[in-house]
């Protein structure tokens, strides 16, 4: 398509195709340079601005958002998503609007925006758009995660259930698998890891069937096993996904290393503290408070298991402050339990 568009002098089609190819390469080849992806998206944006092509500008801004998400910079990614959303609405492109809204609410869920403010923005998206039902499902998925942070677990489950209905009606099985990650995290916050396992298992099976590896879903599934005290099974799942996790986004690598550290500490491995420290360092390179807090509380547990209680308590206190900054009341309560265990 690129060759044909170039030969025919169609710059619009040429850059749509270049942008699409770059995005696909980033998804299918983990070693693709993210900096190259950003450079292509910025050049495409310049071309589309010259052509006065609003949908093209929206697509380019969405790719820029994807770049910043991969870097764990959700604030910058949210800014790019909002620009993309403006262009999508101006063009009347409902599909682009729904996909861009998904990018934006993902940034609100995982990024630095406090949960109460993010909840308000999600509700505003639901009220101010006609790009339904896909937009509704995308927003409800992230809204479920945000409500769970506030301890509103029934509301969170209701939002996730409605989003699942829509994805099922639309036949979007991979989107439904992504939704199950958020639903499982909700059950973990509600201190029900067995239910989290049940919620996540269909997604795990689907990804194994379609892709051959569960990727990050496998790490989250291992977390549900670990929280049930099934440490050997958690270790087996981590070993399965380790080859692909080495090339994943910084945020996912942080979660992987933090859980790996907790499992290693249970086995009395002296290297467990170094693994936990790596998880913390990876999280610190992002602007994601929950991620940083999760890494800190995992470090606290690791240190406690290694009988370094004073250091563990300090890390648990760090985690509590980070959770409160995000407005994640449910996780802060769980971190307080870890703190009391360390002090005791």
Image: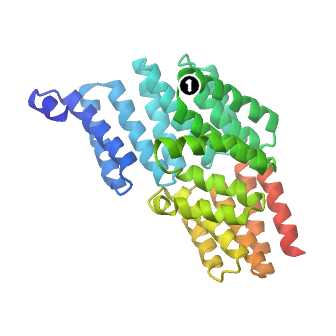
Q: Which residue is mark 1?
A: 135
**Image quarter hosting the N terminus:** top left
Residue 148, above or below 218 = above
Residue 205 quadrant: top right
197 displayed left or right of 85: right
Closer to us: 187 or 299: 187
**Image quarter hosting the C terminus:** bottom right
Residue 229 quadrant: bottom right
| Residue 149 shows in this picture | no
136 displayed left or right of 14: right
Residue 156, above or below 111 = above
Which secondary structure, mark 1? helix
Residue in the image at 59% along x and 45% along y: 204
Closer to us: 68 or 257: 257
Residue 210, position in %: x, y?
47, 41
| Residue 35 shows in this picture | yes
Residue in the image at 75% along x and 35% along y: 156
Residue 188, position in %: x, y?
75, 49
Badge 1 crowding class, 10 Å Cα cut-off, few under 14, some 14 to 19, many 20 or more, is many
Residue 35, above or below 8 = below
Residue 168 quadrant: top right
Q: What colour scheme was applied to this rendering of the protein?
A: rainbow
Residue 5, above or below 108 = above
Residue 249, position in %: x, y?
48, 55
- Going by the picture, which residue comes out furthest to the left? 7
Residue in the image at 49% along x and 48% along y: 69
């Amino acid at each position: 398509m690129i060759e044909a568009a170039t030969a025919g002098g169609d710059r619009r089609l040429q850059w749509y195709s270049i942008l699409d190819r770059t995005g696909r390469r980033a998804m299918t080849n983990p070693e693709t340079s993210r900096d190259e992806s950003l450079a292509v998206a910025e050049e495409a944006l310049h071309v589309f601005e010259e052509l006065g092509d609003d949908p093209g500008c929206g697509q380019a801004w969405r790719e820029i958002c994807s770049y910043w998400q991969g870097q764990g910079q959700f604030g910058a990614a949210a800014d790019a998503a909002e620009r993309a959303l403006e262009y999508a609405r101006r063009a009347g492109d409902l599909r682009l609007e729904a996909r861009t809204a998904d990018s934006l609410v993902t940034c609100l869920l995982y990024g630095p925006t406090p949960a109460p403010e993010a909840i308000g923005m999600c509700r505003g998206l639901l009220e101010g758009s006609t790009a339904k039902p896909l937009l509704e499902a995308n927003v409800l998925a992230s809204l479920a995660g945000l409500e769970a942070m506030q301890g509103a677990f029934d509301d969170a489950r209701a939002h996730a259930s409605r989003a699942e209905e829509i994805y099922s009606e639309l036949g979007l099985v991979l989107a439904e698998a992504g939704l199950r990650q958020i639903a499982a995290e909700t059950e973990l916050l509600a201190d029900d890891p067995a239910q989290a396992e049940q919620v996540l298992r269909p997604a795990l099976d689907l990804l194994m069937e379609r892709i051959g590896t569960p990727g990050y879903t496998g790490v989250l599934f291992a977390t549900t096993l670990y929280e049930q005290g099934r440490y050997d099974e958690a270790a087996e799942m981590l070993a399965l996904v380790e080859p692909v996790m080495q090339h994943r986004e910084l945020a996912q690598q942080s979660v992987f290393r933090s859980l790996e550290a907790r499992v290693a500490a249970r086995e009395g491995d002296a290297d467990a503290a170094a693994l936990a420290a790596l998880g913390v360092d990876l999280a610190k390179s992002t602007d994601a408070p929950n991620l940083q807090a999760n890494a800190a509380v995992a470090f606290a547990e690791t240190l406690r298991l290694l009988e370094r209680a004073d250091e563990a308590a300090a890390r648990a206190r760090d985690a509590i402050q980070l959770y409160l900054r995000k407005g994640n009341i449910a996780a802060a309560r769980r971190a307080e339990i870890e703190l009391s265990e360390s002090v005791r």
